Image (cartoon, rainbow, N blue to C red):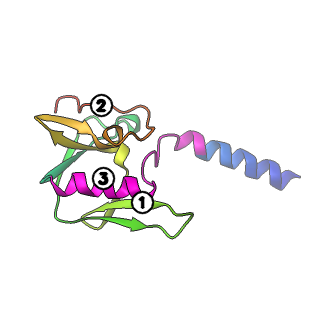
Amino acid sequence: MKKKAWLVCGMISLFSVSGHADQAAYMNKTIANKAVSLLKSKPEIRLYCQPCGDVAWSSQRIRAVQAVNTGYDNLWEVKVNAASVDLAYVYINVTGQWQNIALLLGLPVRGVAKVLPNG
């Protein structure tokens, strides 16, 4: 019984610490392919995790983009330059504004700005 209580407490603390992690890191194949299509038309992305406490965005040139099947429960992820990205914290330039790609794709994310502040 003590082991079960410890496990439950551990799970609660894990989720409270990482409550904003992986909001849009995994998705279905259709959304992943739409994200890849959007990203392939852009030369760079801006990364900004407001819920994580980021005080500024960082920029990354796009060299390669792909949708990858995780092999688990038909979930897909998007990789930019061979690194997995959480679309909740990725912004792309759309007509002069840096917009959140997860929100553009209609993904249910919270705590992120639709348009990058001070973009």
Residue that label 3 marks: 35
Q: From the viewer's perspective, is the residue at label 2 or at label 1 nearer?
A: 1
Name the amino acid type tagged 2: Lys
Residue 83 in picture, x, y percent from top left: 31, 63
The image's mark for residue 29 is 1
Mark sitting on residue 114: 2
> Type of residue at label 1?
Lys
For residue 107, side relative to residue 62 (left or right): right
Which range is magenta?
15-41
What is the spatial separation of the Cα atoms under label 3 and label 1, in whole angstroms? 10 Å
Q: Quadrant of the C terminus?
A: top left
Image position of 6 (left or right of 81): right
How far apart marks 2 and 1 lie (CA) works out to: 23 Å
**Between marks 3 and 2, how big is the CA–CA gap?**
16 Å
At label 2, counting other C-alpha atoms closer than 10 Å, the crowd grade (few under 14, some 14-19, many 20 or more) is: some
User: Which residue does the image show at 34% across and 43% down from the upper left?
Assistant: 105
> Residue at position x 85%, y 51% from top?
2
In the rendered view, does 93 fall on the left or right side of 73? Answer: left
Judge by depth and name the residue closer to the eye, 76 or 45. Answer: 76
Q: Nearer the viewer, residue 9 or 80?
A: 80
Above or below — where is 61 with respect to 110?
below
Choose between 104 and 77: the one closer to the eye: 104
In the image, residue 4 lies at what x, y percent? 82, 52
